[in-house]
């Protein structure tokens, strides 16, 4: 049986995660896309089923992204016990751990884990763009990295991080994954 379908798991994870997240925040009366992040929505959830769905959403995305990274490592013959394989595998593990390190219970750990996961993702993306030896794709990767990280950190500095900033950053990351899968896998 071919495992070729696994190359789409990260693209699917973003769409599924976004759809579930949108469903959850739509259940919250008065939820503001301009003043609240996705992680902060847990403060507003009252229903235990919605809280469980919120947490499982992070776990599911982490697992799907982990599978994608394993597929990429195997497909591109990157040594499993290399620094870059470790970096690429750690990013989805950290993301999945946000199911436990919610902003409600572990605010500082949540921030550190969120930004570490994102930073590791970008390091992995830059490595893969270098690895495939395509100058144009590397330039696109650098541009997406600078725009996403710049937007995320600027929003954090001016205290304007909200779900719209998060959606924009994730959309750029998703675009990168689509380009990578279509062109190199």
Image (tube, rainbow, N blue to C red):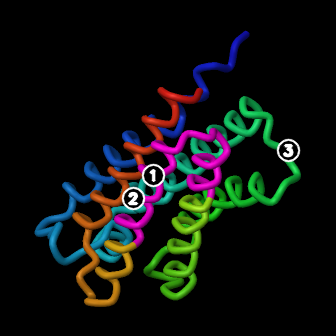
Q: Are marks 2 and 1 in contact (CB under 8 Å)?
A: yes
Mark 3 or mark 2, which has the lower sequence index?
A: 3
Mark pair 1, 3: CA separation = 25 Å
Q: Residue at x 26, y 51 (%)?
A: 22
Which label is found at residue 79? 3
The residue under label 1 is 139
| Membership of 138 in magenta stretch | yes
Residue mark closest to the camera, 1 vs 3: 1
Q: Are marks 3 and 2 in contact (CB under 8 Å)?
A: no
Q: Which residues are magenta?
A: 124-149
Q: Main secondary structure of the magenta part?
A: helix
Q: Mark 3 or 2, which is nearer the eye?
A: 2
Quick one: label 2, few (<14), some, or many (20+) residues within 10 Å?
A: few
Q: Secondary structure at mark 1?
A: helix
Q: CA distance from mark 3 to mark 2?
A: 27 Å
**Picture layout, residue 43 above or below residue 69:** below
Q: With 59 as the anchor, is 169 left or right in this view?
A: left
Q: Is residue 129 above or below residue 152?
A: above
Residue pushed farthest top? Answer: 1
Task: Specify few, some or many for label 3: CA neighbours under 10 Å numbering under 14, 14-19, or 20 or more.
Answer: few
Which quadrant: the N terminus? top right
């Amino acid at each position: 049986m071919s495992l070729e379908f696994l190359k789409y798991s990260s693209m699917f994870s973003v769409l599924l995660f976004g759809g579930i997240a949108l469903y959850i925040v739509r259940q919250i009366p008065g939820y503001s896309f301009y003043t609240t992040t996705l992680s902060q929505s847990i403060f507003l959830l009252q229903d235990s089923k919605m809280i469980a769905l919120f947490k499982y959403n992070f776990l599911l995305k982490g697992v799907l992204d982990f599978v994608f990274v394993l597929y990429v490592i195997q497909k591109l013959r990157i040594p499993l016990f290399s620094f870059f394989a470790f970096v690429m595998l750690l990013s989805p593990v950290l993301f999945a751990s946000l199911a436990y390190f919610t902003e409600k219970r572990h605010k500082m750990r949540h921030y550190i884990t969120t930004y570490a996961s994102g930073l590791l993702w970008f390091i992995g993306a830059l490595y893969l763009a270098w690895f495939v030896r395509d100058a144009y794709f590397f330039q696109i990767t650098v541009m997406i990295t600078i725009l996403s990280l710049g937007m995320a950190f600027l929003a954090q500095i001016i205290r304007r991080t909200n779900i719209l900033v998060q959606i924009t950053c994730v959309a750029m990351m998703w675009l990168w994954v689509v380009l990578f899968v279509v062109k190199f896998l």
